[in-house]
Image (tube, coloured by chain):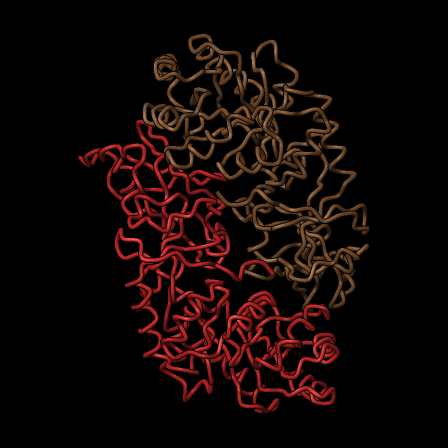
Chain colours: A red, B brown
Amino acid sequence: MHPKSTPSATSVHDLPTPAALVDVDALEHNLSTMASLLPGALLRPHVKAHKSTALAEMQRRHGHRHFTCATVREMVGLANAGFGDDLLLANEVVDVDRLRELAALQDDALITVAVDSDTTVDAAAGAGIRHVLIDVNIGLPRCGCTPGDAARLAQRARDRGLVVRGVMGYEGHLMVSDDRSAQQRDTLTAMELLRAAAREVGGDIISAGGTGNHDVHATNRDRTGVTEVQAGSYALMDTYYSTLNLPFRQALTILGTVISTHEKWAVIDVGLKSLGMDHGNPSIAGHKVWFCSDEHLTFATDKRDAAATAPADAAVPRAPQPAVGTRVRVIPAHVDPTMAMHDSFYLVRGDEVLDRLPIDLRGW
Amino acid sequence: MHPKSTPSATSVHDLPTPAALVDVDALEHNLSTMASLLPGALLRPHVKAHKSTALAEMQRRHGHRHFTCATVREMVGLANAGFGDDLLLANEVVDVDRLRELAALQDDALITVAVDSDTTVDAAAGAGIRHVLIDVNIGLPRCGCTPGDAARLAQRARDRGLVVRGVMGYEGHLMVSDDRSAQQRDTLTAMELLRAAAREVGGDIISAGGTGNHDVHATNRDRTGVTEVQAGSYALMDTYYSTLNLPFRQALTILGTVISTHEKWAVIDVGLKSLGMDHGNPSIAGHKVWFCSDEHLTFATDKRDAAATAPADAAVPRAPQPAVGTRVRVIPAHVDPTMAMHDSFYLVRGDEVLDRLPIDLRGW
C-alpha cells in the first residue's frame, strides 16, 4: 500500500511506516522447532495466521506440504501458487458459487472441505467437491456437528458421492490456559470425543489442535490418535500466546515512527487499523501502551508508568523522551488479524531489511 | 476480494459473504442531516471513516468540497480522483519521501498538513509542502503542541517559507459521554484553548470536532469560533456513537451467512477480520453476540439469552433456529477500522443491491 516501494531500503529506519516486520531468525527458529516436534504431515500449517504464500513456501521447505485454510480465497490462492498437494478448508461454506471455484481446482489440487450439516454436505456435493472431512464439535461453541451425528453425516456424504477422509475438530476453548496440566487433561478429553467420532466416520484423518496446545498433541499422539495438528500462530507469534511459555519467539512486530512527543507520552503512527485489537492493546518493550486510535498509538515515556508494580515514590528515573522520527517496534496482541491488515511484510534481521514479501491471501 | 464479482446480483441474498452493506436511504439521511447542520465548508468530512472516493463524491454532492485525511494514501488518492479543492492531512508526518509525494500534488490540489513540532515543521518545509496548520493539543493525550508553543511553531513555519493557514485540535476525549451537558461544557473549554492559540497563530482556519460533538459545534459556533468540523463517522455510524442519540441512522452493516447451527447458538461467517474490534463486540438485532473468532461470529439463538434483563424463569419462547444459509446483518462497534478491512461495499436499499463501490483509500 506504499505506492513508492523501497526495494533499495536496507535498514528498517528507511522504511515507510506502519510496516509489518518479520525477524527471519525468530521465524526460522519457530519453523524448525515446530518441524522437529510435528514433522511433515503431522503438521498441517494454518495459513489464516499469515495469509502469505511466501510464508507457506517457508513452511513447505521445513517439510509441511499439507495446509489448512479458513477461507475460499486462501484455498484458491494457495492452489494457484502451486501448494495444492493437500489443501483443507477447515470451515463451512454453503455458497455453491464459491464451492464451485474450489471444485474447479480439483484436477490440479487435492481439495477437502469441512462439513457439519445436511446443508453443507449437500452444497459440497452439489458444487462437485470430491473430498470432505466431518467437522465435529468438541467443546468450542462454534462449528462442528454433535459427535453423535458424525456417522450419519458421513453416510449422507458418501450417499452423495463424496469421499469422507475422516474428521476434524477444533478445541479452540483450550488454546490458552494458566493451568497447563488442566489444558492437557481437557485436550485429551476432547480428543476422546473426536477419536470416538472418527471410529464411526471412518477415513484416515483426525485433524485438530493449534499453537496453544501443539505440545499436548506432539507428546501424546498415542493417546489422542490425532493424525495432524492445525497450528498457525507459532510461525509469527503474538502476546496472547506468549503467556504460555511455548518454545516460539516473537517474529512479527509492527514498525512505527514517533510523530509527536509530550512531557509524559509519545505517539507513533501505528494505530488500530494496523493491529488486531480483539485481544486488547499491543505491547512496546519497556513502555506502557496507553491507548490506540485509528492511526495512532499513545505510550507512556515515563518509566514510572511503565513499571506499574513499582511503588509510586520509587526513584525510577524518567526515560529520555524519544525524538520525533525515532522508530519503535510494536508487538501485536493477536497475529492473525494483524497480518490481514497489511498487504506486505518485510523480512528483517535486526535492523537490516532482507526482502519485502506480499500478504497475498487477504480477503475472502 | 471476491474473485468472481456478482454485478448481476440484485438481492443481498445472492452476495458472497462477508460483505459490507451501506443502506442508501440511511446514508442519504445522514449526509443531508449533517449538511443542513454544518453546510458547505463548515464541514470538512473525515475520509478516514470510510476510505472511499465514491463516498467522498456523495459528500461533495451534499456541498462539502474540503476533506480531512489521516494518511498520505488518503490524500494522494483523493487528489488523484479530483477531490483536490482543499485537502487537510490532520496528522503528523516526518517521512520526507511521503511528504514529497504530497508536495508533488500541489499544482493540481491545495494540500495542507498538520505540524506540531520543530521536526514536523522542518520536514514539511524540506519536502516542499506549501501550507500547514498548527496542530494544538487541547486535552486528548495524542498529537498537538502545547497551546503555549503554537505561536512559536507558527513563526518557525513562516520563517521556513510555509503558509500557516491556522490551527486544528482534536478533542477526541470528548466524543462520547453519558452526560451531554458536561460534554458541551468541556468542548467549549477545549475550544477556548484552541481559539486562544488561533489568535496567536493567525490564519483563518480553526478546525476541530467530530461526529460525537458535531451538534455542540453546530449550535455554538459564535462561542467556539470554529470555522469547520472534521466529522466522519456520521455518514455510516456504529454502535459506539449510537449511544448518543445523534440524528444519524445506522447505514453500515456487515452481511454474513449462517454456516452452522446448534441447540443454543448459530455461527455466521463474519469474523474479527471483517469487523473493527477495538470497541468490543458487534451487535445483531434481537440476538446476543457471544464472541468473534477470526472468521466466525457465534450468537445466541435462545431469546432468553438475548433478553439478558428478563428473569431466568420468564416464559420467553425459544426463537426458531435460523437455517444454515440464512443471511444475518451485523452492526459494527467501530465504523472506521471495519471499512478499512473491506475492499468494497454494496449500496443497498433493503435487500436490493444497487451498486458495488470500491473502498480504494485503504492502507497508508
Image coordinates for residue A137, horizontal then vertical, percent: 59, 75
Q: Residue at x 57, y 87 (%)?
A: A198
> As drawn, which residue projects farthest toward the front?
B107
Image coordinates for residue B61, horizontal then vertical, percent: 73, 29
- Left or right, residue A6 beside residue A205: left
Is A354 drawn above or below residue B30 in the view shown?
A: below
- Left or right, residue A339 beside residue B175: left
| Quarter assignment of residue A94 | bottom right
Is B58 drawn above or below residue B288 in the view shown?
A: above
Can the viewer see residue B213? no
Q: Residue at x 44, y 38 (%)?
A: A296
Is A75 drawn above or below residue B59 in the view shown?
A: below
Can the viewer see residue B53? yes
Of B86 and A221, nearer the camera is B86
Question: What is the quadrant of the N terminus of chain B in the image?
Answer: bottom right
- Left or right, residue B248 beside residue A107: right
Is A308 drawn above or below residue A48 in the view shown?
A: above
Q: Residue at x 45, y 16 (%)?
A: B164
Image coordinates for residue B121, horizontal then vertical, percent: 36, 23
Image coordinates for residue A71, horizontal then vertical, percent: 59, 66
Q: Residue at x 81, y 54 (%)?
A: B10
